[in-house]
Image (cartoon, helix red, strand yellow):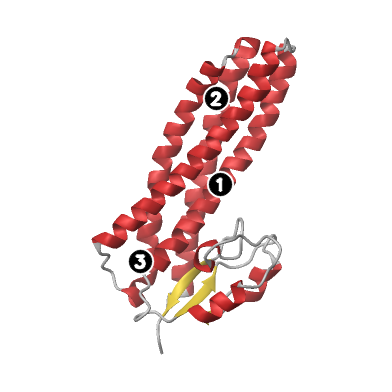
Amino acid sequence: MATEAEIRKHQKKLDELIKQFETGLQDQLDDAFDSVAALGTDASRTDVLQIFESVRAWADSETQKLNTVIESNIEMNATVLGSDVNQQTLSKLQDVRDQMQSQIRTAIDQEQNRVIETIVLAGVAGAVARDLISQTRSIKEGSERRVGTVFGNAVYQFDAIVTRARSPQDRVQRYQYVGGLIDSSREFCQTHDGAIYTEQEIRDIWNDTWPGQAPGDPFVVRGGYNCRHTWVAVEEE
């Protein structure tokens, strides 16, 4: 199976991708909200839509980097799964990536709508400009956190789907739950970190309930929301 060094290298790539997105997102939202604040009570719905269009375009380009997750995952599992990836599998993974991209765009649209509801409608109602600017700053802080969380979840779920799509049952029978532990790791992940299970064992365990659990396939949702764990295919002895 993948060595600890390979797992750490893969985990680092995932974390770096998320960190790069969060840093870029902060810059993008800084510019967007500065533009909204500059308009103040003159801001219109059309203005806000145009301002956030650049944020969406940037997020689309960043999401394309999810291809690096495929490459890293394949490298980590090469000894078990082989290095070849057929076109059907690649096509499926690109479809999944596009779905993740749609989730991130939706998250940005939701933040855009918060601005419209809070700033534009308040401006129409005659709110004081300085109060609108204060509210804008408050919304921005929440926006960075919410959109960043969506992207982080998307990256780890996408990685899990990559592993699953490349694990035909006649070649892989067991998986290891890896990712290490941090201060905020939920008790469920603390219990199973590093453990090796068959698919049936995994599905039996995931039929249980625990705090922070997310609905869906255990190979995709893993420990739940914001989970950093992933599944690694294990070679048969």
Q: Quadrant of the C terminus?
A: bottom left
Q: Pointer 2: residues within 10 angstroms few (<14), some, or many (20+)?
A: many
| Residue, disc 3 | 75
The residue depicted at 60 percent of the width and 38 percent of the height is 144
Instruction: Describe residue 135's horizontal placement relative to residue 231 as left or right.
Output: right
Image height check: is 229 above or below 42? Answer: below
- The quarter holding residue 142 reads top right
Q: Are marks 2 and 3 in contact (CB under 8 Å)?
A: no
The residue depicted at 38 percent of the width and 71 percent of the height is 77
Q: Nearer the viewer, mark 1 or mark 3?
A: 1
Residue 236, how many percent across, how many down? 40, 86
Image height check: is 65 above or below 71? Answer: above
| Residue, disc 1 | 150
The residue depicted at 47 percent of the width and 63 percent of the height is 160
Q: CA distance from mark 2 to mark 1?
A: 19 Å
| Residue, disc 2 | 32
Q: What is the number of callouts on the image?
A: 3
Mark 1 secondary-structure assignment: helix
Image height check: is 177 above or below 124? Answer: below
Q: Pointer 1: residues within 10 angstroms few (<14), some, or many (20+)?
A: some
Instruction: Describe residue 156's horizontal placement relative to residue 214 as left or right.
Output: left
Q: CA distance from mark 2 to mark 3?
A: 38 Å
Q: Is residue 198 visible?
A: no
Q: Amino acid at mark 1?
A: Val
Q: Nearer the viewer, mark 2 or mark 1?
A: 1
Numbered tag placed on residue 180 in the rendering: none
Q: Quadrant of the N terminus?
A: bottom left
